[in-house]
């Protein structure tokens, strides 16, 4: 993995696919949220954050993969809600294991509810970690600079040469 740290101003991208290095035909947007401040109050917590928006080039063959991976791996309210729901859904299997170990009777749940409690967390977390592993570039805000981590080392070196 190639790590490149540059200033936020005037980021230039090679006109190649971030995944394979072929000629780029389209672009995909990746957003990253960086929390700047956290304020603790009596009844709530207030955070302020800044969103970094990066548009990177991809070829036609990798457009769909890049789009899905970038959407699933972003920090946003929708993904947070799905993650929280999956954690709550895991309480069903955890309760089943507790009742099994302690030889307590199992409650009567419908098949659909059982499939949700077992299937939804497995599906959500497998898609989440797949998306994280498929993202061609990971960005990180460093207060005035941006850190890029490229999976394609040759592309990262070319990106570094253009932006240095």
Image (cartoon, grey):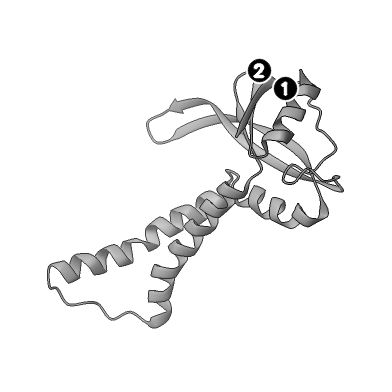
Query: Disc 2 vs disc 1: Cβ atoms closer than 8 Å?
Result: yes
Quarter that holds the N terminus: top right
User: Position of 107 compared to 136: left or right?
Assistant: left
Q: Which residue is mark 1?
A: 8
Q: Quadrant of the C terminus?
A: top right
- What residue is rendered at 78% in x and 43% in y? 21
Q: Is residue 142 above or below residue 111?
A: above
Question: Which residue occupies the foreground of this view, 161 or 101?
Answer: 161
Q: Give x and y (percent) for residue 87.
A: 39, 56
Q: Nearer the viewer, residue 46 or 32?
A: 32
Q: So how many labels did they put on this image? A: 2
Q: CA distance from mark 2 to mark 1?
A: 6 Å
Residue at 52% from the left image edge and 31% from the top image edge: 47
Which residue in the structure is indicated by mark 2? 144
- Residue at the spot x=84%, y=48% of the render? 26
In the rendered structure, which disc, 2 or 1, sits on the residue that comes first in sequence? 1
Q: Is residue 92 left or right of residue 16?
A: left
Q: Position of residue 73 (x, y in %)?
A: 59, 47
Label 1's element?
loop
Q: Position of residue 41 (x, y in %)?
A: 41, 29
């Amino acid at each position: 993995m190639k790590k490149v740290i540059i200033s936020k101003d005037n980021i230039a991208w090679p006109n190649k696919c971030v995944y394979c290095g072929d000629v780029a035909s389209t672009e995909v947007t990746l957003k990253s949220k960086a929390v700047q401040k956290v304020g603790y109050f009596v009844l709530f917590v207030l955070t302020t954050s800044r969103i970094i928006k990066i548009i990177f080039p991809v070829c036609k063959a990798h457009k769909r993969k890049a789009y899905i991976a970038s959407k699933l791996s972003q920090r946003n309210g929708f993904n947070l809600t799905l993650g929280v729901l999956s954690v709550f859904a895991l309480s069903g299997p955890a309760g089943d294991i507790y009742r099994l170990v302690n030889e307590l009777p199992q409650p009567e749940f419908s098949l659909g509810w059982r499939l949700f409690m077992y299937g939804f967390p497995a599906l959500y977390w497998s898609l989440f970690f797949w998306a994280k592993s498929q993202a061609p570039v990971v960005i990180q805000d460093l207060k005035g600079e941006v850190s890029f981590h490229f999976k394609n080392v040759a592309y990262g070196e070319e990106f570094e040469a253009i932006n240095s």
